[in-house]
Image: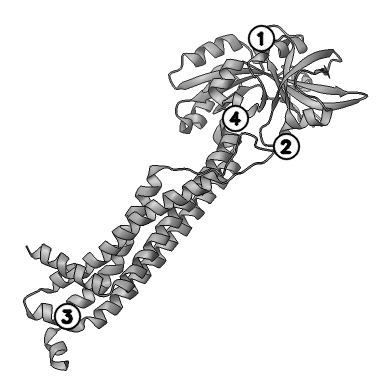
Amino acid sequence: MRYAIIIDIAKALLLARWRQTLVAAVGVTFSITMFITLLGFMHGLNDLLDGLILNRTPHIRLYNDVKANEIQPINRLFSNDYHFINSVKPDNAGQKIRNSGAILQALKNDSRVLGVAPKVSAQIFYNVGAINLTGVINGIDVDAEQKLFHFSDYVPKGNYTELKTVPNSIILGKAAADKMLTNIGDVIQVTTPDGERHALKVVGLFQSGLQDLDKVQSYASVSTTQKLLQQTEGFITDINVKLIDITLAPTIAKEYAHIFETDAEDIQTANAQFETGSDVRSIISYAVGITLLIVAGFGIYNILNMMIYEKMDSIAILKATGFSGKDVQYIFKTIALSIGIAGGIFGLIFGFLLSNVIDLVPFNTAALPTIKTFPVNYDIKFYVIGITFSIITTYFAGLFPSRKASKIDPVIIIRGK
């Protein structure tokens, strides 16, 4: 019964000063709206950039790096003397991964692995009249590349599956195709480092969104690339691994490097700077949003302080008629929480609507042909964080004024009147 009376009194005080109440609620609503919109947009942008880079990056890459020979001929002849050697050249081990078939099978049987995709990387020259342009052909397993790295999302023109069905076919980088004045259906000439010249049919255009990458990079099937290099079926230069849990990549990479006697690079090492940028953007978004909520909390604090000064006589009468200091404190906490909850709910609604508006704004750029509108993330956790901070901020905004109201001496107030 007492709580019902407290709520009725809080409601009466709210309505008696409805303009100030509305201003405080609008402040909370605006803060939550901008908090939701800002976080949704910034995380949507992070997801877009992650898709451009991280989705195309394996969690672990197994390869053989070019290294200097650890044992030089001079070490074999003079083992007990000091040797000073300059310009040590790499050994002739090559970039081929030894026992690639057995490694692929072992990786497929590893319960921590989501999937594997073999690759053959070949340095070539695109022949454009009398000019040779430097390029790289990545020989891929088309089905594995699509399953693990969403390959079709980066092929705006052509059909990526034709790499499997059309002999001697290639998907050119969009920037390279523009430079060569080449389109789908054309036949281009490429030359390998050994001087072998081959004709390849263009069946698609690849666009990663990174101009420098698209100037040199192209894709063919594993078998076509092996044929260009005059290598056998077992010739593999890279094995790309996707894990079920990406956070285990550094540990598992070291394990694979030891077991398979290859070099292993994890995604955290390969993209450390990029992940740092994403984290910084997220921190800035949260910092701005929380700052807005704190500012709204100070607004509520000031309004409640003014209300206490204006309602001194009402508070004195309440205490004189039997209401305790805690009851008065509950009244003003109820006022603050009512403003916070109401403003927070409307803020969530307007934040969602504003995010929808941003999501519909056209965003057309030649570098990202698959992106049509601005990216927005609608993760439910943003809304949970928003309403939680709204309640916490307004609670503390009402806590200190309510304590002040609870300590008012009714005798002094009534005597003064």
The three-letter code of the residue at mark 1 reads Thr
SS at mark 3 in the image? helix
Label whose residue precedes the other's in the sequence (2 or 4) = 4
Q: CA distance from mark 2 to mark 4?
A: 15 Å
Residue closest to the far right: 130
167 with respect to 392 (left or right)? right
Q: How many marks?
A: 4
Q: How far is the residue under mark 2 from the one under mark 1?
A: 28 Å
For residue 156, above or below residue 166: below
Q: Nearer the viewer, residue 191 or 372?
A: 372
Precedes in sequence: disc 3 or disc 1: 1
Give the alpha-carbon distance from disc 4 to disc 3, as whole Å: 67 Å
* N-term mark: 4 or 3: 4
In the image, taking residue 322 as reference, residue 185 lies left or right, namely right
Mark 1, residue position = 165
Mark in front: 4 vs 3? 3
* Residue 274 visible in the picture: yes
Q: Under tag 4, what secondary structure?
A: helix
